[in-house]
Amino acid sequence: MKWIYVLFGLVAGMTMPVQAGVNLRLRESLSDPVYAAFVSFTVGAVVLGVYGFSLRPAPTMAMISSAPWWSWTGGVLGAFFVFAIIILAGVLGATSSMAWLLAGQFLAALVLDHFGLVGYDVHQVSWPRVAGVVLLLAGAMLINKY
């Protein structure tokens, strides 16, 4: 059953360069990466809102108030990520942009896992994990160079 999640992750990952290209085109039309990111987030919020509020019960105030303060920063981080993709895709292209974004994600993931930050269970850093991230960084450098 775990393979379904691996497949889901692969499909979700495959949407990232497509989203980058779509948002890059939107940036060209709007002449501004900030407005392109805003439109992207607004459309996404509307779609999620329609889906969520029509098919699921709304969260209660108790549920909302029980969330830790830092859990509300996800939207800001997401906005930065979308904005960064819009900038990077136009300068580096799809492959280099995704390589550097992926390398950065793995570097952060090592730290988050090791210390059990932002809700993750602790997964100690090991030499094989570090080697994997180093290989990803080397891959990003090769992709960027060629």
Image (cartoon, grey):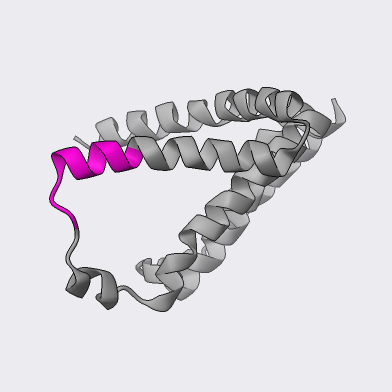
Relative to 62, 117 lies left or right: right
Q: Main secondary structure of the magenta part?
A: helix
Q: Quadrant of residue 138?
A: top right
Residue at left 26%, top 69%?
A: 64
> x, y (%) of residue 101?
65, 44
Q: Quadrant of residue 87?
A: top right
Residue at left 57%, top 23%?
A: 18
Quadrant that contains the C terminus: top right
Q: Residue furthest right?
A: 145
> x, y (%) of residue 63?
21, 70
Relative to 96, 75 lies left or right: left
Residue 102 can be seen in this image: no
Tally of marks? 0
Q: Tell me which segment is drawn in magenta.
A: 48-58
> x, y (%) of residue 54?
17, 39
Give whichever of 13, 85 is nearer the camera. 85
Residue at left 36%, top 35%?
A: 47
> x, y (%) of residue 131?
62, 52
Residue 33 can be seen in this image: yes
Asked if residue 109 lies in the magenta stretch, the reply is: no
Quadrant that contains the N terminus: top left
Residue at left 34%, top 28%?
A: 7
